[in-house]
Structure formats: C-alpha cells, structure tokens
Amino acid sequence: MRSNAFLLPSVVLIASTPSLCDFPVCRSCGSEETLVAWVKRSERNVPPLGYGIPTSNGGSMLTKIPVTYPMGQGEPLNIIISGNSDSRVLVDSPSDGGLQNYFQSLGFSGECLGQRESVHQAANLGDGHDFKNETAVIRWNYGDPELGACKETIQGGNHFRYWIQDGPQVNSGAIFLAASYEKPIAQQHDIIPNGYNLGRDWLVGNITQSSIPTLNLTNGTTYSGSTSSEGYTYKTDISYLSGYLEDTNDGINHNISVGVDGINSVDGLVAVLDVDITQVPPNTSYVHFRSFFSFSL
Ligand SMILES: *[C@@H]1O[C@H](CO)[C@@H](O)[C@H](O)[C@H]1NC(C)=O
Ligand SMILES: *[C@@H]1O[C@H](CO)[C@@H](O)[C@H](O)[C@H]1NC(C)=O
Ligand SMILES: *[C@@H]1O[C@H](CO)[C@@H](O)[C@H](O)[C@H]1NC(C)=O
Ligand SMILES: *[C@@H]1O[C@H](CO)[C@@H](O)[C@H](O)[C@H]1NC(C)=O
Ligand SMILES: *[C@@H]1O[C@H](CO)[C@@H](O)[C@H](O)[C@H]1NC(C)=O
Ligand SMILES: *[C@@H]1O[C@H](CO)[C@@H](O)[C@H](O)[C@H]1NC(C)=O
C-alpha cells in the first residue's frame, strides 16, 4: 500500500510545535504513519554490512513478474541503499530529508499524476516477508519534478522499483532498487540493450555528475558525489560489489534484446549506496515542501 505521504498536494506546510514526537519537523504527529515510521526507525537492527543479503535467507536478487516469455524470468535488484545511511533518508517520506526527497535530488519522481502501474513486480529480500510487491515505481523526471514522470512514462527513460528490507527476520531499513532504462510506451516499455546495467550506472552518474564506464566496472570500484533537493544535501558513497547477482542472461526478463554484443543482461554487479545528509535547510521548523506527487489530488 502506498503511504499517504505520496498523496500530499502541493502546499506550503508550516510545522507546528511537535507534540507527540521530537522530530525536528513534525508535520502530522497524530498520524499513525508518522508514528510507525518513528518506531520503525528506532527498532531497526542493521547488520554491519548495512543490509541482509537476500539469498542468504531464502530470498532472491531477482524480482518475480506475473507474466514473462518464457515464464519465470525476473529483473535484477541492482542498487542497494545501505541501512548504514542516515536514518532520515531511510524513511519513505518526501519531507525531513526522506527517501522521496533523496530520489528527487537524483532527478527522479513518483508516478505520473499519481497513477499506479498495473503490473507489479515482487521481491523477496530474505527479511521474513517473503515476496512482496514494490513500494512504488520511480521515474527519471527530465528536470521537471512535477510532470516529468509523465514524459518518462510516454517516452521511456530510466526508472526503478523499490522495496524496503524491514521484515521480522532482517530489519535493516535498507532499500533495494531494480533499475532499468525502458523504451517508449509505444514499444510496450521493453528495456533498451544493456538497459539494466545502464539504468544502474546512469543513476550513479546522476549522483557523481560524471559518466560511469559500465564496461570497466569491477568488484570494489567506488565513486562519491553530492546531490541536493529542498535544502537537503546528500553525500553518497557508491561501491560496486559482485557476488550477489550472477553475471548472466539466464532467467532475465527481455534477455533476448537486452543482452547484446557479448554483454550479459546482468553484469553481476550491484551498486551499494551509503547516503549521508551533509546539509539541511537553514531553519528546519519552517519548510516549503514541494510534494513528490504534486498533482495526485
Ligand atoms: C501484487 O501485484 C499483483 C499484480 O501484479 C496483484 O495481483 C497482487 O494482488 C498484488 N499483491 C499484493 C499483496 O498487493
Ligand atoms: C543522468 O540520467 C539521465 C537519464 O537516465 C542520463 O541520460 C544521463 O546520462 C545521466 N547522467 C550521467 C552523468 O550519467
Ligand atoms: C576502460 O578500460 C580500458 C582498458 O583499461 C581503457 O582503455 C578505457 O579508456 C576505459 N574506458 C573508460 C570509459 O573508462
Ligand atoms: C568483492 O570485493 C569484496 C571486498 O571489497 C570481497 O569481500 C568480495 O568477496 C568480493 N566478491 C567477489 C565475488 O570476489
Ligand atoms: C533467456 O533466459 C531463458 C531462461 O529464462 C533461457 O532459456 C534463454 O536461453 C535466455 N536467452 C538468452 C538469449 O540468453
Ligand atoms: C525558525 O523559524 C521559526 C518560525 O518562523 C522562528 O520562530 C524561529 O525563531 C526560527 N529559528 C531560527 C533558528 O532561525
């Protein structure tokens, strides 16, 4: 279920004095959702690595898709936002420097006009929740946080689904992303050649503001970069790791057209992002929030 935070209209919110909790900014302390996010944060139990490896606890690094040709193919979880990141970034919210604002700092926004994709993909993060549908689909916004995701839906572009590792067995708070660069809707949103690896690396390139040499990446390649949105600046350290995903074409959705020129659809690398907040708005008790989903109401 999508959180109400995703459906806020575009408004200027002036935070009142927090009463029920001690967030620096507390928009709706009475709301169950805010309290849940708060409790979840304090109850997170982060393994030293920053996340649990799904495959070590019955999960999978590939998504499950209702219908594929042949059946049973999945898409790679090729980016992980580490549970060692700043706790504020791991809260699925557009405010307080939360995850949706972080995505916006990378040039991505939520679904066009609050629509929801009809086909969901499920992931099993090995956290005790088994397979669950994505939390949301996030799209490259072509420089327009409000309507750009509509352009992406029609023209294609980079996008990702994400899941939060918050189950009873592993509650790291880490976020797992399945990124890919899709073709226009007129071409049924197929994935471009090498579109999983490129989707991952163009998102990383949006953090570093430099082009990532996909074919030269190896286990242990690192980068770093800073991005900003709504007065928050995020510093992201990126490390590419092998061993979680296979370097393969087998069982990968659209593998016939994505794996080309001798390069597998999935190159076997996952980009692990560790995100810090290095700057906050000057006065965090007065914040102008531009909603992530401005037109959804
Ligand atoms: C997940 O999405 C599928 C459609 O892709 C739907 O049939 C199913 O009910 C959804 N599951 C949940 C728990 O919402
Ligand atoms: C940022 O993302 C866009 C859209 O995916 C992509 O075209 C561009 O190359 C990326 N920037 C870098 C430096 O990778
Ligand atoms: C990739 O590596 C090769 C061989 O080391 C080098 O010649 C090439 O310039 C590199 N390409 C990029 C884009 O970094
Ligand atoms: C990748 O590098 C890490 C250290 O950075 C190492 O622990 C890991 O075993 C390596 N993975 C593989 C598959 O060699
Ligand atoms: C794609 O994956 C299927 C298994 O899902 C495999 O049988 C097939 O050979 C793969 N195709 C290519 C081009 O690698
Ligand atoms: C922040 O803004 C509030 C409301 O406008 C004001 O009362 C407060 O003094 C400001 N605090 C700082 C540190 O500027």
Image (cartoon, rainbow, N blue to C red):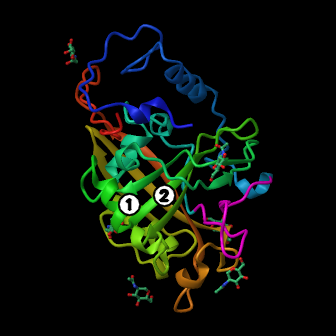
Residue in the picture at 65% in, 61% down: 65
Q: Is residue 38 left or right of residue 230?
A: right
Residue 32 image offset from top left, x and y in percent: 54, 19
Q: Is residue 257 left or right of residue 182?
A: right
Residue 145 lies, with reference to residue 253, above or below; the image says above
Specify the amino acid type for callout 1.
Thr
Residue to which mark 2 is pinned = 160
Would you say residue 81 is visible in this rendering?
A: no
Pointer 1 or 2: first along the chain: 1
Confirm whether the magenta stretch covers residue 67.
Answer: yes
Residue 124 lies, with reference to residue 208, above or below; the image says above
Image-quadrant location for residue 205: bottom left
Residue in the picture at 24% in, 52% down: 144
Distance, label 1 to label 2, CA atoms, is 12 Å
Residue in the picture at 59% in, 26% down: 42
Residue 115 image offset from top left, x and y in percent: 42, 46
Q: Which residues are magenta?
A: 58-77
Residue 292 image offset from top left, x and y in percent: 34, 40
**Mark drawn on residue 153:** 1
**Mark drawn on residue 85:** none
